[in-house]
Image: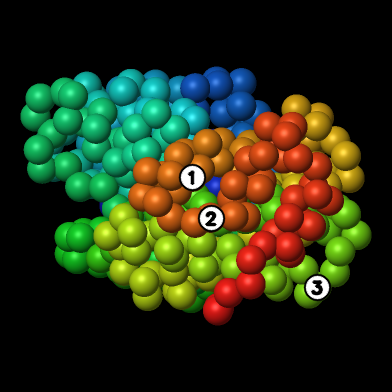
Amino acid sequence: MRMKKIGVLGAGTWGTALARLLCENGHDVTIWSALPEELKNMSTTRRHPNLPGMELPALLHYTADISEICSGRDLLVFAVPSVFVRSTAKKAAPHLPNGQMIVDVAKGIEEKTFLTMSGVIEQELAAVPGHEACTVVALSGPTHAEEVARDLPTAIVAACADEAAAQTVQKLFNNPNFRVYTNPDRLGVELGGAVKNVIALAVGMALGLGYGDNAKAALITRGNAELARLGVAMGCQAATFAGLSGMGDLIVTCTSMHSRNLHAGMLLGRGMDVEEAKKEVGQVVEGINALPAARKLARQYKVEMPIVEAVGRILDGKLTAKAAVAALMGRDLKRE
């Protein structure tokens, strides 16, 4: 594939790891950040403070100008935290040409609208006339930035109802260490990427309480059952939740030392309050952001999600982590 001009919105660990990957794949890549000092540090040191050992390519470009990052790009990657996706899309929309292909790698559900991040981007594009032909592909799966930055083997899913668009993204990102599959079920793929962070909080809490692998396995598998029930009720394909963006992402987020959500859950299980845990983790804990929308979706679609609800009650201060585990274990008996 010939060299493409690609813009990456967001200079966090995931955006930077993907910018490096795309650059190494032979593309002309520019990273945008709203923080000029962050870009200056990265361009000067060719390092990212949260990705030790990774050297940034000399050919990687940097800009704090939103109009520059949105102009003349074959592909635009949204890699800002979920809470900033709407504001970033709003800033970008007036500068984007009709027909722009966009990849969203942020994982989350917006509380007020119940939209996934791709849906949020599409809504902001629709608010500015002349974006009818824009396409948004979700790229999601069991992918820690720390490992992608070290070229460790990784698999991920490019999801879009437009199969040709998904295949284009597949070819741009795929390399010998980064295998990309396609899936037409974008909503299912994005739900998996958002709700798994809530389940990881629950697993972390159990570990923080000193519980073992049995409890971890139970929470992962029953958590995936909750995710699949919600997804099917919302019109997603059940098979999606057995794949990379469902069970795959859930496993890595609930077991990895790199997982911010697992770490935050462990701190909560040991007795820290939410704000203390977030401060200690030092980076965005997406599970806390996704939790309110996940709870509301469960109620709207009348889907039973006891683990998600238990995490919500713990974070609301209505239940201790230990009492929540006892309540889950004491629920009425039923078939699997």
Circles 2 and 1 in contact, beta carbons < 8 Å: yes
Per the image, the residue denoted by label 2 is 305
Q: Residue at x 89, y 45 (%)?
A: 270
- Lower position in the chain sequence, tag 1 or tag 3: 3
Residue 45 placement (x, y as % from top left): 68, 36
Q: Give SS at disc 3.
A: helix
Give the mark toward the camera: 2 or 1: 2
Q: Could you tell me how far apart the alpha carbons at marks 3 and 2 are, in whole angstroms? A: 22 Å
- Lower position in the chain sequence, tag 2 or tag 1: 1
Q: Quadrant of the N terminus?
A: bottom left
Q: Callout 2: 10 Å neighbours few (<14), some, many (20+)?
A: many
Q: Give SS at disc 2.
A: loop
Residue 219 placement, left or right of 172: right
Position of 54 relative to 121 (above/below): below
Per the image, the residue denoted by label 1 is 294
* Residue found at the far bottom of this picture: 335
Q: Residue at x 75, y 27 (%)?
A: 275
Q: Which mark is residue 213?
A: 3
Front residue of 189 and 166: 189
Residue 33 seen: yes
Position of 129 relative to 178 (above/below): above
Front residue of 101 and 117: 117
